[in-house]
Amino acid sequence: MKPGAALKVVSAKCPKCSSTNLRRSRWHRDDSSQLRQRWSPYRCLACGNRFFRLSGRIVSFVGVASVCVLIIAVIAFAIFAITTDPPGIAQPASSQSVTLPANAEKNAEPAAAQALVEGGDAKSHYERGVRYLSGEGGLAKNPAEALKWLELAANQGHSGARYKLGILHRTGLGVIQNFETAFRWLELAAKQNHADAQYDIGLMHKNGQSVPVDFVKSYVWLNLAAAQGHLAATQAREEVLQMMSTQQVAEGQRASRDWTPVQ
């Protein structure tokens, strides 16, 4: 093999004297066809040193390949960063079981019940409030929290929630005691034919608790509760009868017959 025509190259440096005054040779076979080599021969015109370096095509390919690998690495890292949770924040998959802290069960809500609560279902609001009152059903006892859920149900017309709100305000459980507010909630429940509420309203009229003493109204509410089998109301009605005149009894009986519940 013998060197062919020489070409001047200024991109390389002589490893001996650092001169860029170089000439590059192309190797040819004896049949004059070009031999593609990975390395190209050079001669320094300044010091006469001969040396080899990677051919320009190989260098260009390596450079392009390096850039491509770098771009792919950056894209892969970005995808990994997006799909991976930051340190300390665990997002368990829905199909995996999750171990809750020891006290978490006290505030856990079944998924179906939670969905109803979020959907504004009055019955689910009421039931959740009752569980907070009793401390049962997986919830810690919390009268103040019970008050909040019962108010949601009561404002949607739930008679049971209205009755319990009346009791909470009358006893001061989970809220500052207020007989006027208690009477308002109890009366709303009583008008919906809630027997316990009718009994309590009857006693409040009998004793003048937050309202003036009124034996006729007391008799009407106690009479309505007694008609539903409320034994305590039946006994209280007999006590009120002893304090009423014949005219008042007739008025109370007539009001009881004409009464209709609020839907």
Image (cartoon, rainbow, N blue to C red):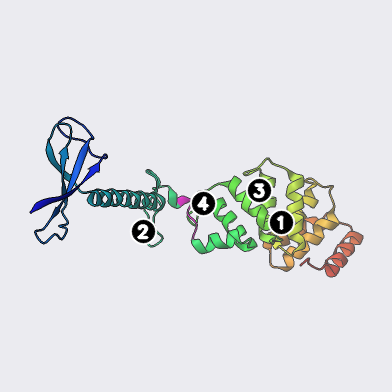
| Figure disc tally | 4
N-terminal label among 1 and 4: 4
Which residue is tagged 3? Answer: 168
Q: CA distance from mark 1 to mark 4?
A: 23 Å
State the image coordinates of residue 9 (x, y, percent, origin top left): 24, 42
Upstream in sequence: badge 2 or badge 4: 2
Dominant SS in magenta = loop
Instruction: Say the numbered circle drawn on residue 97.
Output: 2
Say which amino acid is labelled 4: Gly
Which is more foreground, mark 2 or mark 1? 2
Q: Earlier in the sequence, mark 2 or mark 1?
A: 2
**Span of residues in magenta:** 106-110
Residue 171 seen from this side: yes
Q: Disc 3 versus disc 1: distance between alpha carbons?
A: 16 Å
Task: Estimate the x, y position of residue 5 in percent, counting from the top left.
Answer: 18, 50
Real-space CA distance between mark 4 and mark 3, rounded to the nearest whole angstrom: 15 Å
Pointer 4 residue: 135
Mark 1 residue type: Asn
The residue singled out by tag 1 in the image is 155
- Element under label 4? loop
Q: 166 left or right of 28? A: right
Q: Position of residue 151 (x, y in %)?
A: 67, 53
Image location of residue 132, percent across then percent down: 55, 51
User: Foreground mark, 3 or 2?
Assistant: 2
